[in-house]
Structure formats: C-alpha cells, structure tokens
Image: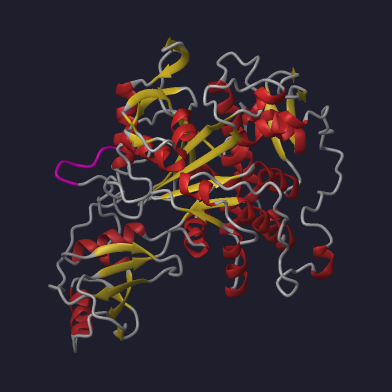
Amino acid sequence: MDGPTNRKDAADGLPPDRSNRAPKPLPAHLDPRGSRGRQSTAPAAAPTPSIRPTTVPADPPRRWGTRRILSWIAVISSVAVLATAGAGYALINHYDGNLNRIDVFGAGERPEPAPGNAKNILIVGSDSRGDDPDAAFQGTGADFVAGQRSDTIILAHLYGGVQKAQLISFPRDLFVPIPEHTGANGKLVAERKDRINAAFAQGGAPLLISTVQKLTGLRIDNYLYIDFDGFQNMVNTLGGVEVCLSKAAKEPLSGIDLPAGRSVVQGDQALAFVRQRDGLPRGDLDRIERQQQFIGAIVRKTLSAGTLLNVFKLNSVINAATQSLTVDESLSFGELRDLALRFRNYDAGGVIFSTVPVGDNTRIQGKDVLPLDEPKAAELFDQLDRDIPPGVPPAPPGAEPGQRLVVAPGSVRVKVSNGAGVQGLGRRAYDDLAAVGFQLVGEPGNRAGSADQTVVLHGPDKADSARTLVAALPGATAKLDPSLTRTLEVVVGSRYAGAEPVTVSGAPPPAAPAPEVKTAAQDPCAT
C-alpha cells in the first residue's frame, strides 16, 4: 500500500485517512488500454443524451458529510465486478496490494460460525467528523464535519446452500445494547443502550462488530469499508445507473433535482438520490429504500452482458474498488475474489433486500430513536442463523434446515483423492462410493499431507450434490472450492469409516406463500 498507515486509526478499527492518497494505476503490462489507460486514473464516461446534467451548486463541507451514506453501495458493485474478473496471478497481486487492512476482531469471544458455507459480512459506510457522536447529520460549516459516524450499516448474509444473498440494513437510529468496552481514555465503559451508530463513533469497527454480534447472535466473518471517492469513480466508470421516482424530487439539503419517472444518474445526482432524507415521509427508512433501489440498479448493470464483456471498463472499476476498500486482516484479495465468484453465480433475483424490523420513532434519553421490533427481529435473525432464505418451507421433522437430499448419487460426479497418506485408502473410498451408486471420475489420486477428516470439495452451484455426498460419508464436511465446476472432489482423511447408502427425497415441495421481498431484479418503474 502507498504511504504509511495511520497507526492510531488502525488500532481503533477505523479506516485510516487516505483522502490525499493518489490513485494507483494498473501496471503498464497489465493495463489492456496501454498508455491510453494511464492518462487518467478516473476516466469520465462518454457523454450520452440519456444522462441528465449532474452538476449541483458546490458545497465543499457537505461533500464530506455525504461520504458515509454511499460507501456500502460501492462495496456490492465492487463484488459484482470482481466476480467477473478472470484475473491472472499478476493482476490478483496488483489488486491485493491496493487493499487496506485493519485488525477488527481482536481476541474476544465470538459466536459460532454460520452453518455450511454461509457467510456474514458487515459492510459499513462512515465519515470522520470530530468527537461528537450526536452531531446533527445535516448542517453547515464546522457542525457538518463533526463526529465519527456509521450512518450506513448493512449485514450481507451469503447463503450456503442456495445461490442467494440477503442484505439487511440497520437504521442508524436503531436503539440497541452496546457491549462493555474500553473507552478512548483506557477506562472500562459499562454496557448500555444507545443508537447503533454510537458504537462506531465510540469504539470503531471492533465495537460495532461486537454490537451487531450481540444483537443478532450471528458471527461476523468479514468486515468491509469503502470510501465515497471509490463509489463515485465506479458509478461514473459504469456510465451511471437508472433510477426511478414516482414524483419529481427537488430538495436543497441533498441537492436532488430529478423528474418523475426514469433517470440515469451519476456524480452529484447519484449522490443526492441516495442521500436525501429531508422531505421523505419516513426519513431514514425511506432513504434506505432509495439505497436498496440504487444497489439493485448497480447489480443489474454490473451483471449485464455489456459490462461483463468490456474488459477496459472492468479493469478500471476493479482498480478503483480495491483502492477504496478497507477490509479485515484475514481477508486477502484471493478470498475476496472467492466470495465474488459465489456472487457471479447469482442472478439479480437472488440478491434480497430487507431492513431490521423496528417500531415507531420515539424519544429515549432525549434522543429520537427507533426501537427494535423484538419478535420480528428475533425471527429474522433465527432464519439467518439457520441459513434459511425467505420463503423456504421448514425442514421435515428430524432434519436440519437445508439438509433435504434432492440429488441422487447417480447424478453426482466424484473424483477421489487420498489426503491421509495411508496406502490404499483412496482406492478403498473409490470402491465404496461406486458401490453406493456415485458416478466416479478418473482413478484415485494423492494429495500431500496427513489429513484426518474427510472433506467434500464442491463448486458454487453444487451445494445440493455435496449434501448428498456428505450424507454418504459419516464424519465428512463440505467446503466450497470456486475452481470446481461439474465434478466434486473427496479428499479422504485417516478417520474415513466407509460409505453408506443415502435416501433422496426428490425435489423439495413447493414453498408456502413467501413473504414479499425486494430483490435486485425488480424494476421500480415497472410497478
């Protein structure tokens, strides 16, 4: 990474200040545009008649205040674009060098991991505005740049057994328990209830992660933060995205000035579209709906053929995205790319939006807050904990959620590798699996090492096949390997105890009427 890291920020779990960091272009030998690609680190999109003018009156102090609003939207577009990249080793190293990493988990106790291959990723947008966590969001001059806030918090749950992701927004005024922690002065701060954005203001990413884990009971596997400049670069590089309003909007605090119906927005108007809160009937909750509409538009555009086939645009967007990302120390670019490869197998309808259930706005401790709707929130968090997507029927009695076997052994292609170093173990497993009906591919191979547990490796769209294979191998576990496609691989461990016949129940029954959900596939102008 370029330049020294701000050690105090890193220690607090806050992204270091990189506002003066010069964009790092792709190396010449990796940039498909050659010298043309190095003339500008943020190439402007070609003018098009369908894009409305995006310039609004300049307000430099306000630009800082809006940075936190859009950060998480850019993260998702980054993941969508990263998923399409067929980056070679040199490019992966280059993008990996762009990432900024901080320690956010520490040594504290954390909940159990999500079942199977499910992942929980906390995505945060924030801005540094001094020391006052209760400073008003909107204002002018010095008041506008006071306080460190996390006004946008989203939990991305990537389901393990289906190609879906659910993005759960947390309103910034959500009134929640903030765990006991050590304050900036080194003194212990007792657990108390406050707005959720106070956790980030007073303890950075580590305290926010602890707060979300305590509230939901879910383990946070990874943390992502992205700055506003990265958002603008990516939206502009994409050539803007299409949004829709039921009526014209013109409001001076956000700067929005758009007609009713469809508009393609970028720059200032993209910012204003997702920033507006004043004048909306439900304030921050309506703003969250705007942000969900915008992210859906980004997902549809990044997964469109025109974007996927444009290598010049992809490299520009990926470079801007990785320069803007701050991630937890455990997340390498390769791991980020593996997560993105899972996203590549989704369609826009598999990206589901929801908001943490809340009650009516009220005043507590002299503050306007949103109380948690505890029964509905408990149901949502339980579904996530058990990795059950919206609308999926309950599992039959005695079966774990998501464990219904729907793929017959004869439809599962299996390669066997001996991972234990025990002579003849691979051949034994090969013969056992053939005897219970699996489709064996090639001859048994060997993997270096002395594994004790048997592992079933599978590609992103073969989770159902992997469940059948794991059920046939007592003690085995499944693990995602994005490099695999049609064929699964069994790496046999020394505790291998044979293969058993399995009972397949057939296709799952039709789901009960599902609660209405919003997805990235929905066109807001079509309803």
Please state which of residues 139 and 427 is positioned toward the viewer in this rendering. Answer: 139
Dominant SS of magenta comes to: loop
Q: Is residue 336 left or right of residue 415?
A: right
Whether residue 47 is situated above or below residue 153 in the rendered picture: below
Q: Residue at x 18, y 46 (%)?
A: 399
The stretch in magenta equals 392-399
Please state which of residues 524 and 204 is positioned toward the viewer in this rendering. Answer: 204
Whether residue 517 is visible to the viewer of this picture, yes or no, is: no
Residue 269 location in percent, x, y?
75, 32
Whether residue 270 is situated above or below residue 139 in the rendered picture: below
Residue 158 location in percent, x, y?
42, 48
Q: Residue at x 29, y 50 (%)?
A: 115
Question: For residue 444: magenta?
Answer: no
Q: Residue at x 65, y 14 (%)?
A: 279
Residue 108 location in percent, x, y?
30, 47
Q: Residue at x 29, y 84 (%)?
A: 444
Numbered marks: total: 0
Figure coloring: secondary structure
Q: Is residue 286 left or right of residue 308?
A: left
Please state which of residues 260 and 74 is positioned toward the viewer in this rendering. Answer: 74
Give the position of the N terminus as an image quadrant.
bottom right
Give the position of the C terminus as an image quadrant.
top right
Whether residue 386 is visible to the viewer of this picture, yes or no, is: yes
Q: Is residue 93 left or right of residue 240?
A: left
Residue 465 location in percent, x, y?
32, 61
Q: Is residue 259 left or right of residue 120?
A: right
Whether residue 92 is situated above or below residue 365 in the rendered picture: below
Please state which of residues 158 and 467 is positioned toward the viewer in this rendering. Answer: 158
Whether residue 510 is situated above or below residue 195 in the rendered picture: below
